[in-house]
Image (cartoon, helix red, strand yellow):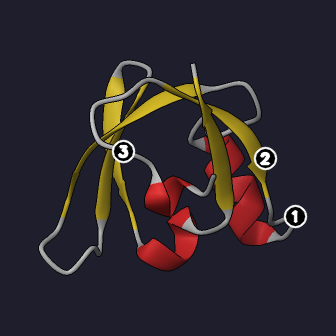
Amino acid sequence: MGLIHAPREKALRVTCVRNSGAFGRRLMEMGLIEGAVLAVLRRAPLGDPLHIRLGDYELSLRSREAELIDVSPL
């Protein structure tokens, strides 16, 4: 399932990041790599941005960025 559709407060594993350009490298530098564990903390009222916890830190992703990340439940 895409990260954009993932349930809140559930542990998820990244299965695929579908971007190999500069943006894909940026995501990998932030730790969003295949096998990483994350959780969706909250969504803004209109769904953008998406606030996630990844390891020991939190970050926000735009919807168009979250659509490029596939996850599966742990």
Does 35 sit above or below residue 46?
above
Tags 2 and 1 touching, CB below 8 Å: no
Tags 2 and 3 touching, CB below 8 Å: no
- Residue 16, given in percent of the width and then of the height, sits at 78, 47
68 and 72: which is toward the camera: 72
- Using the numbered discs, state the Cα–Cα distance from disc 2 to disc 3 in whole angstroms: 17 Å
Describe residue 45's horizontal placement relative to residue 5 as left or right. Answer: left
At mark 3, the secondary structure is loop
25 and 64: which is toward the camera: 64
Q: Nearer the viewer, mark 3 or mark 1?
A: 3
67 and 29: which is toward the camera: 67
Describe residue 1's horizontal placement relative to residue 9 as left or right. Answer: right
Give the image quarter of residue 9: top left
Residue ID for mark 1: 20
Crowdedness near tag 3: few (<14), some (14–19) or many (≥20) residues, C-alpha within 10 Å: some
Quarter containing the C terminus? top right
Which badge, 2 or 3, is on the more N-terminal residue? 3
Which of the numbered marks, if any, corresponds to residue 7? 3
Describe residue 62's horizontal placement relative to residue 73 as left or right. Answer: left
Which of the numbered marks, if any, corresponds to residue 50? none
Tags 3 and 1 touching, CB below 8 Å: no
- Residue drawn at x 47%, y 62% as measured from the top left: 4
Give the image quarter of residue 65: bottom right
Residue ID for mark 2: 16
26 and 62: which is toward the camera: 62
- Residue drawn at x 76%, y 69% as measured from the top left: 22
- Using the numbered discs, state the Cα–Cα distance from disc 3 to disc 1 in whole angstroms: 26 Å
Which badge, 3 or 1, is on the more N-terminal residue? 3
